[in-house]
Structure formats: C-alpha cells, structure tokens
Image (spheres, rainbow, N blue to C red):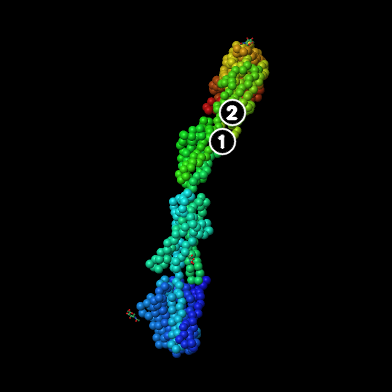
C-alpha cells in the first residue's frame, strides 16, 4: 500500500460551536470521516481552541448509529478522572490521549470492527469559557473475496426473443457493499432495454459483510460464440477504489444452419472403381443438425450415414453422380442442402486384336491393337520379353522373322490416375521353313583318326521341324542328345572318325527343309616318332626291359653259383690262382664282367624298390 492503512482523513470541516457568550467561544476541528481497514486501529483526532482560557475542560465522546438519534457515551474525562463507560461496544478497546502541543485529544479505537462504522462525537466543555462539539464518521473497509463467475452450460439460442441468463457472478464478504460490472471481451456491458439485463442480489450476511450476486441476462447473437464474458467486482478501500476481475468464460451459442457444404474427404485424388469414398457434410449451424444423404436421382432414398459422413465402399462407375446432403434445423424447420458431383473413374480390361495367338508367315506384316475403355485418357506401351517395343494402342509388326515370334504384352495405364492399369497380350507365331541357327551352313573340321567327334544341329521353325542326319565315310554314329521346345530343335550326334566324314543335317517341316553340312578331315593317329609314344606304351617297355634285366641277373647268379660250387676243392689256392692269373688279359675281362653283374644286381634292387613303392601306395 502506498498510503497509511490505518487512518485516512478525507475532508476537514471546521465546526463552530454555539457559544453561550459572545466573548467566550471554542473552535472545534474534526475530520469529516476517518477510513480504516477492519481489524486495524483507528485514530480520531478532536482539536479545539478556546477564545478564553478555561479553568477546567471536560471531554466526552459519544457514538451514534447513522440514521438514529440516540447517542451513547463511551468516554468521560476531566482534570481529575478519565472514564471509559462500562457496558458499551468500546469497553476495553478505546483510549483517549492528548495531541502533542496542540489543544486536543485523540480517540484511538483498537481492533476496529464492522459495527464501528458510526459517527463519533467529541464534546468539549470549558464551562464559562464555552463549549463545543464536533463529529467524525468512522468508515470501515474490508475487500470482498475474488469474484466467481459461472456460465450457463446449456446452449443459448439466438432465436430467443428475450435476453436469457448466460452467466452469474458472485463477490462474497465485502464491506461496504461492492459493485459488480459485466464485460464482454473487455468492453463493459451496460444494461440496455431488451438486450442486456443485470439482476443483482445483495445479501447482508449476519457477520455484517455484504455478498453480491449478479446475473447477466443477454440476448445472444452468433458472434457471441467466440466472445469471452467476465465480471469485475469494484470496491473501496481506505483512500482508493479497487477492482478485481473474474476469469473469462465462453458460452455455447445455438444458431440455425444457413449453409450446408458437402465435399469429398477421401480419397484426396481422383476416384477409381474399387475405392472407398468418404463424403463429408457440414453446415454452419450449432449444434450441428442431423444430416441426411441422398443421390440427386433418388431424392426419396436416404443413404445410410453417420455423423455427417457418408462412406461408399468399393465404388463403381454406377456410383457416379450428384450427391446431396440436407439438414433440417430443429428451431426454424428450415431445410438447407449442399451437393457435389462424384466421378468414379474406370479402366476396363484391355482387348487385344488379334486375340490370344496369331500365326504369321515369314515376311508377312500384321497390325495388332490394344484397347481399354476408360473414363480418362490412357497410355499404351507394348512389351516383348520385358523390352519396350512400341507405344500407342496400335502395334505394327512388319516383315516377320522368327525373332518376331513371341508374346506381345500391351500395358494400358491412366497417367492422371496411377492406380488404374490393365494389360493384354497376343502370342505371335511365325510359320516358315526351318532356319538353322548358325548362318554358316558348311562346317569344316579336323579330327584324329578313330576318335569321336560331336556334331550339333539347331534349327528354328514353326511348325517344329524334325532333324535327320546322313553320313558318308562313317557308319559309326549315334545321337547323344535331342531337345526341342516350341519352335526350336537341337540334335547332337557323336560320330567316329574312321576316315574323312561328310555329315548332313536336315531340318524339315511342311514348309521346307534346311540342310547343314559338316566335313571332317581325318588326321592319321600314330607315327614312328618317339615323342608320339603314348604314356601307356612307355610303361610297358620299361616293364619288359626290367623283366629282361631281372632274368639276366638270375641267370648270371645261377651261373656264378654253379661255377663256385665246381671250384670248392681248390680252396683259397684256387682263388689265389685266379688272382695270380690276373696278368692274363682275357680272364681279367671275365672278372670285370662279374663285377659288372654285381653292380647290376644292386641297381636292380633299387629299381625294384622304386617299383614297390608306388604299388604299396
Ligand atoms: C461494569 O458493569 C458490570 C455490570 O454491568 C460490573 O460488574 C462491573 O464491575 C462494572 N465495571 C466497572 C469498572 O464499573
Ligand atoms: C457502486 O455503484 C454505485 C451506483 O452506481 C456507485 O455510487 C458506487 O460508487 C459504486 N461503488 C463502487 C465501489 O464502485
Ligand atoms: C471457448 O469455447 C471453445 C469451444 O467452444 C473452447 O475451445 C475454448 O477453450 C473456450 N475458451 C475458454 C476460455 O473457455
Ligand atoms: C560329345 O557329347 C557328349 C554328350 O554331351 C559328351 O559326353 C562328350 O564328351 C562329347 N565328346 C566330345 C569329343 O566333345
Ligand atoms: C536331306 O535333304 C537333301 C536335300 O533336300 C536330300 O537330298 C537328302 O536326301 C536329305 N537327307 C536326309 C537324311 O533326309
């Protein structure tokens, strides 16, 4: 608070008291009113000036309830005694003291109560010096509680002719009586005949406080649906006026439907057959009235819908048309309607001409078409073996060859509605004489004499050709593989090259024959030169040589043994003889031979050992 709370002097009045004598008088000075908060203490000064010094002064304080003439004394004081009167409301709560150096007294009331709001009289009696009286109105203040606003929950219709109660506001326990003011979006609402009424109920509580309740009766319009209503309580406090505002509330305004809109909520894009379509109907009235849906062509047939939403499942082109949504205002019984056009787009299955499959002769031309009926513009692309071969609904096949044959697929799409597509196909068969796979019809090759060679022949034709072989130069042949699919046949023969061979492969169907020829030059197999010896032959020769050496070794051993046996009686001397005879060159040759034999034996063991090695493995 910016100002002292306990005491407020608003207006000063000088009251001239009546004087008994023209020469003796007293001037009284008292505040008109003193303002104070409840429970605070109040000071009421009483100043007086005597024109003639009195011998003694007697002071009395009285109270009087406003509007009553009865006064009650609460205090008496003179030079000898000061008495607070017994049995009054002020007993024990008041003191009277001198005011500093000036002539006067100060009545102090402690613990001010609401009932203290009275007039206080100060009576000064100076006997011969004159007497006087002054008064001060003590005003007590206590702010009310914060205002509480309550809106009417039910909707209020703009069609009500008289103002309807839309809210009430209460400010409780204030003193003195507070005021309530109403606001709409911060603009005060002043009572206006036929538009705004404010009904105020003031309750004076037994506690002495005032409670104020105010009802706002208001004629609502549609704009009020977004307005905020609030109330403000205004009250006085010592020396000032204060206000406290309630929170804002809004009210539910009911107004009739003037416009109904119908639109498609989903899908967001174009509608195609099979889609689920949701139509939403909304009017501008509150509360939303019930809506009924129907098709324009069948006004009497109500379509089943909920909460203003019509769901059409798996629509077909037959669901296209104008849809209507109607609302009947229950207040005004006026019907309002909204409508919209629903277009369900479609794409029929593609029709390909020629149908299914078509036979062409080689060199022929053909025009194929692919058509699909649609409500929207379509685009057609032709594919063969997943390769794009044409665009547009006409496909021209010119000068057919076997590579022309195959499956042609046309794909029809709707560029503006990607969900729509269809396709069709035609199988093209090219009929003609067989065609060999390799352009080169004369195959020349060389092969070793006596070996087998594989010859293959692959032909393409419709109808499927048969393959026949003829050989000259060899009687030894066999077919190792034949494989055929729709238009292709492959035959593989294995032929033995016994001399130069000429082979003919004929592929034949009713349209003709095509021949492929092979000529195989036989190359002589084995010559005298060693390098051409096969590995197998080498092995055999080695074994034969080893066997010969073995036989020689055994023979040699036997001869040596027999020779030794025959010479036993000679003993060492015999040997010595030989040693002696070493001078004979012929004999030396023989001995040398035996030595060589022993070496051979050792060598042979080694060879045998090697031979055993691999055989053990
Ligand atoms: C005040 O009055 C009551 C009875 O009314 C009495 O009992 C009491 O003694 C009195 N007090 C004084 C201070 O006179
Ligand atoms: C309350 O309203 C009355 C009458 O309009 C007015 O005299 C008084 O000053 C108002 N009180 C407050 C606290 O505004
Ligand atoms: C007013 O009402 C609207 C709906 O009617 C609501 O969304 C909004 O929160 C309300 N505002 C207040 C302050 O109550
Ligand atoms: C010939 O073909 C058969 C079967 O495919 C195959 O087993 C064989 O090894 C081939 N012979 C030659 C010499 O290619
Ligand atoms: C293959 O065709 C040729 C020419 O048409 C013919 O002379 C030959 O006899 C045919 N050979 C076979 C095995 O059909």
Residue visible at 45% across and 75% down in the picture: 137
Label 2 Cα crowd, 10 Å radius (few <14 / some 14-19 / many 20+): many
Q: Is residue 246 above or below residue 402?
A: below
Label 1 Cα crowd, 10 Å radius (few <14 / some 14-19 / many 20+): some
Query: How far is disc 1 from disc 2 in space, using C-alphas?
Result: 21 Å
Q: Is residue 237 above or below residue 52?
A: above
Q: Which residue was labeled with disc 2? A: 411
- Tell me the SS state at disc 1: loop
Residue visible at 51% across and 57% down in the picture: 184
Question: Given the current orientation, which residue lies at the most extreme bottom position?
Answer: 55
Residue 39 picture location, percent across and down? 43, 72
Q: Is residue 337 in sight in this rendering? A: yes
Q: How many marks?
A: 2
- Give whichever of discs 1 and 2 has the lower sequence position: 1
In this picture, residue 512 sits left or right of residue 4:
right
Residue visible at 51% across and 75% down in the picture: 11
Q: Which residue was labeled with disc 1? A: 270
Between 398 and 529, the one lying in front of the other is: 398
Q: Nearer the viewer, mark 1 or mark 2?
A: 1
Residue 300 picture location, percent across and down? 47, 34
Q: Quadrant of residue 479?
A: top right
Between 445 and 529, the one lying in front of the other is: 445
Q: Is residue 191 above or below residue 590?
A: below
- Tell me the SS state at disc 2: strand
Between 207 and 355, the one lying in front of the other is: 207
Between 508 and 66, the one lying in front of the other is: 66
Note whether ligand 4 is within 8 Å of mark 2.
no
In this picture, residue 235 sits left or right of residue 584:
left
Residue 316 picture location, percent across and down? 51, 31
Residue 407 picture location, percent across and down? 59, 23
């Amino acid at each position: 608070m910016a100002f002292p709370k306990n005491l407020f002097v608003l207006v000063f009045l000088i009251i001239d008291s009546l004087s008994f004598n023209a020469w003796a008088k007293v001037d009284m000075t008292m505040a008109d009113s003193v303002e104070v908060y409840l429970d605070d203490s109040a000071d009421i000064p009483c100043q007086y000036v005597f024109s003639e010094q009195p011998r003694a002064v007697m002071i009395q304080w009285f109270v009087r309830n406003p509007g009553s003439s009865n006064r009650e004394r609460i205090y008496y004081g003179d030079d000898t005694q000061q008495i607070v009167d017994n049995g009054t409301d002020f007993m024990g709560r008041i003191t009277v003291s001198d005011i500093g150096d000036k002539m006067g007294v100060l009545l102090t009331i402690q613990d001010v109560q609401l009932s203290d709001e009275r007039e206080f009289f100060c009576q000064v009696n100076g006997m011969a010096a004159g007497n006087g009286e002054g008064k001060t109105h003590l005003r007590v203040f206590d702010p009310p509680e914060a205002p509480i606003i309550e809106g009417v929950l039910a909707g209020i219709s703009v069609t009500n002719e008289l103002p309807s109660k839309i809210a009430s506001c209460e400010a409780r326990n204030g003193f003195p009586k507070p005021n309530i003011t109403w606001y709409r979006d911060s603009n005060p609402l002043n009572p206006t005949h036929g538009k705004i009424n404010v009904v105020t109920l003031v309750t004076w509580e037994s506690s002495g406080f005032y409670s104020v309740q105010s009802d706002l009766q208001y004629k609502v319009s549609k704009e009020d649906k977004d307005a905020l209503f609030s109330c403000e309580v205004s009250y006085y406090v010592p020396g000032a006026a204060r206000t406290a505002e309630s929170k804002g509330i809004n009210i539910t305004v009911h107004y009739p439907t003037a416009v109904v809109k119908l639109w498609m909520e989903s899908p967001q894009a174009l509608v195609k057959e099979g889609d689920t379509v949701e139509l939403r109907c909304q009017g501008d009235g509150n509360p939303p009235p019930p809506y009924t849906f129907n098709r324009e062509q069948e006004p009497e047939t109500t379509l089943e819908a909920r909460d203003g939403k019509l769901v059409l499942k798996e629509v077909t082109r037959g669901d296209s048309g104008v849809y209507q949504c109607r609302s009947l205002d229950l207040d005004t019984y006026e019907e309002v309607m909204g409508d919209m056009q629903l277009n369900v787009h479609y794409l029929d299955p593609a029709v390909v001409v020629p149908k299914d499959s078509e036979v062409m002769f080689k060199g022929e031309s053909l025009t194929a078409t692919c058509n699909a009926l649609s409500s929207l513009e379509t685009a057609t692309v032709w594919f063969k073996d997943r390769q794009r071969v044409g665009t547009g609904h006409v496909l021209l096949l010119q000068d057919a060859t076997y590579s022309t044959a195959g499956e042609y697929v046309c794909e029809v799409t709707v560029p503006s509605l990607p969900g729509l597509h269809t396709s069709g196909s035609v199988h093209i068969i090219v009929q003609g004489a067989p065609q060999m796979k390799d352009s080169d019809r004369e195959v020349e090759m060389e092969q070793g004499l006596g070996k087998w060679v594989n010859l293959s022949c692959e032909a393409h034709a419709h109808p499927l050709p048969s393959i026949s072989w003829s050989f000259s130069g060899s009687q030894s042949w066999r077919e190792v593989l034949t494989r055929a699919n729709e238009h292709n046949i492959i035959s593989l023969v294995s032929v033995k090259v016994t001399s130069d061979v000429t082979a003919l492969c004929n592929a034949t169907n009713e349209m003709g024959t095509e021949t492929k020829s092979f000529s195989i030059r036989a190359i002589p197999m084995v010559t005298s030169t060693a390098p051409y010896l096969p590995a197998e032959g080498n092995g055999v020769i080695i074994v034969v040589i080893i066997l010969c050496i073995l036989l020689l070794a055994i023979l040699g051993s036997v001869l040596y043994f027999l020779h030794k046996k025959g010479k036993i009686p000679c003993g060492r001397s015999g040997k010595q003889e030989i040693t002696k005879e070493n001078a004979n060159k012929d004999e030396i040759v023989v001995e040398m031979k035996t030595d060589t034999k022993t070496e051979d034996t050792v060598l042979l063991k080694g060879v045998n050992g090697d031979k055993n090695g691999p055989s053990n493995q």
